[in-house]
Image (cartoon, rainbow, N blue to C red):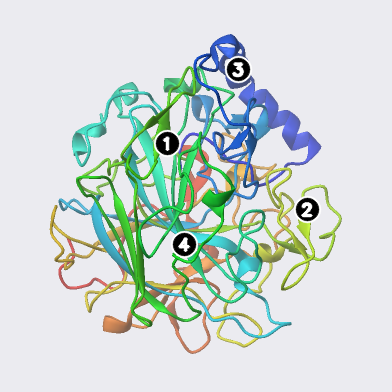
Amino acid sequence: MKGLVRSRLTLTLVAAVVLAAIALPLAVTGVGAHAAAGTNPTFKFASSGEMDCNGYSKIQQSIKKTMACTDPHGYENSRFYDNGHYIGHDEPTIQFLSNSPGSGNNVKWEVTLPVEHALPATQTFEDMITFWFNMAMCDPKSYPQQPCTPDSDSNHSGVDNSKDAGSAFLELQFYPPGFSPFINQISCDIHQWCAALTIDSLECNFGFKFCNPNCTEPVNFAFIQKDGIPTGPPGPADANNSTFTPNKQTLFMGQGDTLDVTLQDTSNGVKTTVLDTTTGKSGFMVASAKNGFEDLDLNTCAPTKFSFHPEFSTAKLGNDVPWAALQAALGVAVEIGHFTPGANGDNDQDDPPCFPGPTRPGCLNFAQGGDIDFDGSSYVADWPNGRHNNPTPVKFGSISHNGFGPLSAPNGSNDYTHGFATYQIETDVGASESTCMPSGDGCTVPPPGAEFYPFFAQSGVGASCRFTFGNDIQGSTVNDFGRDQQYGTPYLAWFFGTNSSGVQPNPCTPHGND
């Protein structure tokens, strides 16, 4: 995502000084200019909620302190600081591109969930805390605070970025089993997967001249439910413990299950549907005002019930969320760099919070942002590789014989027959590297300190062609796209901390591609 960076990886003392100097204009103008006008005196805010996904709100404690938040970039294309805290993290991604109407607001994916092997084998939660499908949303009360017309390519100005529409970032997140409870760890269950619809907004104006310190990055959160009813209020100002506690209607999915995942606009708001084709069970969530979704006022943080709709009609290049560190509008990403095994991790300052299990003891690396020295589970070669010392990989594919990647349908249609001819692979790990400079120098993959960096690969050909993530899969991988080289070089025109492959052809070239 482009303009900010979320708290995930902590930096060395020297790097922190360098980054603080870079972020100084934002810290001074963003907090000092409007601190007195930061709240609405007529609205009583709850003492806890999710008015800042990163946990640094000046007026509210976060209920869930291990949220997977959208990663922004900041003032004059620098690293983003939330109330003085660097919040960047590591999100390898494939973003798909298409000029076809419907490709930006009506898509379907096929995904097969990993299968865990018995301890002491590495578990999926050690490698990644979530994978997610993303889509750009309209939110006129989000950066850069401009009106937005749903399902329209007119929202991207193309020339004057100050005229871009207000944008929010949808992530349909899937959470691996084994490290529960969800409210303060990362799993819903010991053995099963769950999923949630999250939408992050950014309470900053154009150029990050002002960011409200009380509600910098508000997040809406709702589990995918069999009855479509949230477990608790999803809105950032009203969220409570029930919001982050699964109930009997929460959709649980088994290891190895194959899912059809649909993201499409409706008159009530964007609808995310997960059909478990292995069991026949399904769940959904609509990001509607009726369900309690909210956006917030830039100056006062006052909430308004709001129905979120997709921002764009197409997923063409340039139709992106303008504040995100990744150049992203429609794709899939994996959030890595959070788990360090052991009761006290490796005794680094970036380890906490730490937990005794339940599956195995470990630390989640959220207290100072993340695994900033890149020595945790995500940065060693313990990723799926076709052997029983690791889980099977997550597989991303299409719904039919058209090849892997998402499939789109014309607006209002359920005929998902159009593939995506091109994509780009990205990672924003550079923004969290102490060596990475705005010139692009020192922004490396893998990052300094890492023994290994996971990558996307192609498994199978023709109708069986799929993406995997992690390592080469023994007996399955047919193309690993150069392993770490697939991430390309720093994309300075977007954000120096983001590496990008540039636009590439879909290697499966499915029939019906646009």
Q: CA distance from mark 4 to mark 2?
A: 25 Å
Of the image marks 4 and 2, the number of the one nearer the N terminus: 4
In percent of width and height, residue 162 lies at 34, 22
Q: Is residue 29 above or below residue 189?
A: above
User: x%, y% of residue 177?
Assistant: 59, 71
Q: Residue at x 39, y 41 (%)?
A: 292
Residue 20 visible here = yes
The residue at which mark 2 appears reads as 351
> In which quadrant of the rendered view does residue 127 lie?
bottom right
Q: CB under 8 Å between callouts 1 and 4? A: no
Looking at the image, is 69 positioned above or below residue 384? Answer: above
Relative to 14, is 342 above or below? below
Q: Secondary structure at mark 3?
A: helix
Tag of residue 183? none
Q: Amino acid at mark 4?
A: Ala
Figure quadrant of the C terminus:
bottom left
Label 3 is placed on what type of residue? Val
Cα separation, mark 3 vs mark 1, equals 27 Å
Eye-nearest disc, 3 or 4: 4
Which residue is at a point 54% across and 28% down the rendered structure image?
215
Q: Which residue is mark 4?
A: 195
Dot in front, 4 or 2 = 4
- Per the image, the residue denoted by label 1 is 493
The numbered dot on residue 31 is 3
Q: Amino acid at mark 1?
A: Ala
Amino acid type of the residue tagged 2 in the rendering: Asp
Q: Which badge, 1 or 4, is on the more N-terminal residue?
A: 4
Q: In screen coordinates, is 107 left or right of 92?
A: left
